[in-house]
Image (cartoon, rainbow, N blue to C red):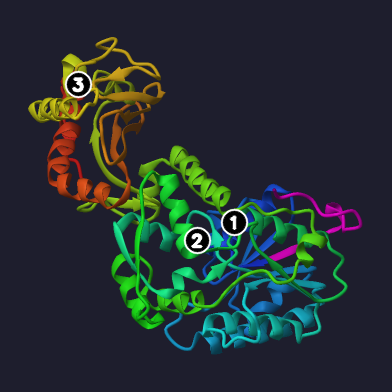
């Protein structure tokens, strides 16, 4: 479990301003939140600061700069005591090794000139004596370049980082969810020491409490030494599915990367570099981090559990209308994917206030029906009953009001905000979990109704279910939203703007 530094470290009040690079990335974004939460003064360096300002607190300074542009770093590093270096060029189209090397030289030189007292860097585990992959070799070279400036560098070297959204975790998710049977190459049995993102962040923050007197390299890893195959089995267990593997000795990293590109959403060039790194053992050989820090990283079971629980919290707090619009994603055939969940969201506008627009939503199901294609809803309930589910026979407690916990046919009310939001969770038999959510926003003259069908598929069967039935869902959910809008119109005699 993450904890505090041992006695003798630098107290929080004595730390000066912090520069954070890579705040738009996976680790950097989460580190920004952790530093802000702990009250540190943070300045972020970003090539496109306008994109980062919406994610940072008002007290956090965001400045324009590029590690490949030495001149742009001078203002960003002015007055900085500690700088986090969390950038890499793995997604570059050219030589990422050359780009990473030049970026590190620029940053190290600028940090030295600015009087920075310490650089904290996150690199990758791997034995220096091995013929490392270009990615791992570059990660370790960056650490050497930074140390060569004379500025004390605290370098953490980590194995697989487990957290919702991390590259390795998303690869594991895709393989388990999309492949009922895997043809597995030798690299799935290479030992690793995965670490939870929470523990990585604990180390990164605790580094601020160490006196910046000399450069150190700390190897960090979780409590378990496992393989990628082990991690996939743990993930499958927590998702309630199974993973079957057929090992073969002939898949090279290059062939594996091509195969990976077919079944996962990873960019092809990043996927190949990741696979090239996986073939090397990444385990902790030096326990200095455990001696220097009061941090005891969790094992792989707890790391996966935390990652999935974090997704649950983020999912519960998500307003899909904001997520879709801010991400630039519009409803499309098959929906939009958020983590493991598939979302079919559609919107309609009605010239009535939110309280009026919400009334038909409160009456949904039971004797009122579902505003369109009621025969298909009854058929779905009958099929669920035949399969041993609850069917639609439960109806509703009241025809005009709902409360959290109430049943609505084969749904149950999970969340309810008066005149604003209703979320139903499905209790029918499904190869996954499903929700139906309505949100109403607006003013005294008009409202916008957002309807979202959300599905968390388990394994390939869950995905096959969603995409096979999507034409029917498209028809039914589209008709339902139009029916809700029409019911709201009838109360005032107005007309709705067609859904999109």
150 vs 446, nearest the viewer: 150
Label 3 SS? loop
Residue at screen point 47% across, 52% down: 234
Callout 1 crowding tier (Cα within 10 Å): few <14, some 14–19, many ≥20:
many
Q: Earlier in the sequence, mark 3 or mark 2?
A: 2
Residue designated by label 3: 392
Find the magenta span and give its range: 1-19
- Marks 1/3: CA distance? 42 Å
Magenta segment main secondary structure: loop
Q: Is residue 12 magenta?
A: yes
Coordinates of residue 409 in the picture (x, y in percent)? 23, 21
- Say whether residue 16 is visible: no
Q: Is residue 99 magenta?
A: no
Reading the image, the residue beneath label 2 is 166
In the image, farthest residue toward the right: 8
- Quadrant assignment, res 40: bottom right
* Residue 192 as seen in the image, left or right of residue 43: left
Q: Which residue is mark 1?
A: 197
Kindly state the secondary structure of the residue where label 1 is placed: helix
- Residue 231 picture location, percent across and down: 49, 58
In the current view of this chain or complex, which residue is farthest to the top? 398
From this view, report whether residue 64 is shown above or below residue 169: below
Seen at 88% across and 58% down, the residue is 9
Left/right placement of residue 353 relative to residue 289 reads left
Q: Quadrant of residue 287?
A: bottom right
The residue shown at (76%, 58%) is 206
């Amino acid at each position: 479990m993450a904890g505090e530094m041992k006695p003798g470290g630098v107290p929080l009040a004595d730390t000066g301003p912090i520069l954070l690079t890579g705040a738009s990335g996976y680790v950097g974004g989460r580190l920004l939140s952790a530093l802000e939460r702990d009250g540190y003064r943070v300045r972020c360096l970003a090539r496109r600061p306008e994109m980062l300002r919406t994610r940072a607190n008002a007290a956090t300074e965001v400045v324009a700069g590029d590690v490949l542009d030495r001149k742009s770093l001078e203002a960003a590093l002015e007055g900085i005591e500690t700088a986090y270096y969390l950038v890499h060029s793995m997604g570059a189209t050219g030589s990422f090794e050359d780009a990473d090397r030049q970026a590190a030289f620029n940053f190290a030189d600028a940090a030295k000139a600015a009087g920075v007292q310490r650089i904290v860097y996150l690199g990758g585990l791997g034995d220096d004596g091995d013929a490392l992959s270009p990615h791992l070799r570059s990660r370790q070279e960056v650490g050497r370049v930074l140390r060569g400036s004379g500025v004390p560098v605290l370098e953490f070297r980590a194995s697989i980082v487990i957290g919702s959204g991390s590259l390795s975790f998303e690869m594991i998710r895709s393989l388990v969810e999309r492949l009922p049977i895997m043809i597995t190459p030798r690299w799935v049995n290479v030992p690793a020491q995965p670490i939870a993102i929470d523990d990585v962040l604990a180390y990164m923050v605790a580094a601020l409490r160490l006196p910046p007197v000399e450069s150190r390299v700390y190897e960090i890893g979780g409590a378990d030494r496992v393989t990628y195959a082990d991690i996939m089995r743990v993930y499958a267990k927590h998702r309630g599915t199974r993973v079957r593997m057929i090992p073969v000795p002939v898949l090279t990293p290059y062939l594996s990367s091509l195969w990976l590109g077919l079944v996962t959403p990873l960019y092809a060039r990043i996927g190949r570099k990741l696979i090239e790194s996986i073939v090397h053992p990444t385990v902790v050989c030096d326990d200095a981090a455990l001696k220097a820090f009061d941090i005891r990283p969790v094992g792989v079971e707890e790391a996966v559990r935390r990652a999935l629980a974090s997704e649950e919290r983020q999912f519960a707090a998500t307003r899909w209308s904001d997520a879709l619009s801010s991400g630039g994603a519009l409803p499309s055939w098959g929906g939009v994917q958020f983590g493991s969940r598939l979302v079919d969201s559609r919107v309609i506008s009605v010239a009535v206030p939110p309280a009026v627009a919400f009334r038909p939503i409160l009456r949904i199901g039971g004797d009122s029906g579902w505003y369109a294609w009621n025969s298909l809803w009854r058929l779905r309930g009958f099929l669920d009953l035949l399969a041993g589910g609850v069917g639609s026979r439960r109806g509703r407690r009241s025809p005009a009001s709902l409360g959290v916990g109430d049943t609505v046919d084969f749904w149950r009310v999970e969340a309810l905000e008066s005149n604003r939001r209703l979320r139903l969770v499905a209790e029918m038999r499904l190869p996954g979990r499903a929700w139906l959510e309505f949100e109403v926003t607006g003013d005294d003259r008009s409202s916008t109704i957002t309807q979202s069908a959300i599905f968390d598929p388990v394994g390939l069967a869950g995905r096959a279910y969603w995409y096979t039935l999507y034409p029917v869902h498209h028809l039914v959910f589209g008709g339902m939203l139009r029916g809700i809008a029409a019911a709201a119109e009838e109360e005032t005699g107005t007309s709705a703007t067609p859904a999109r």
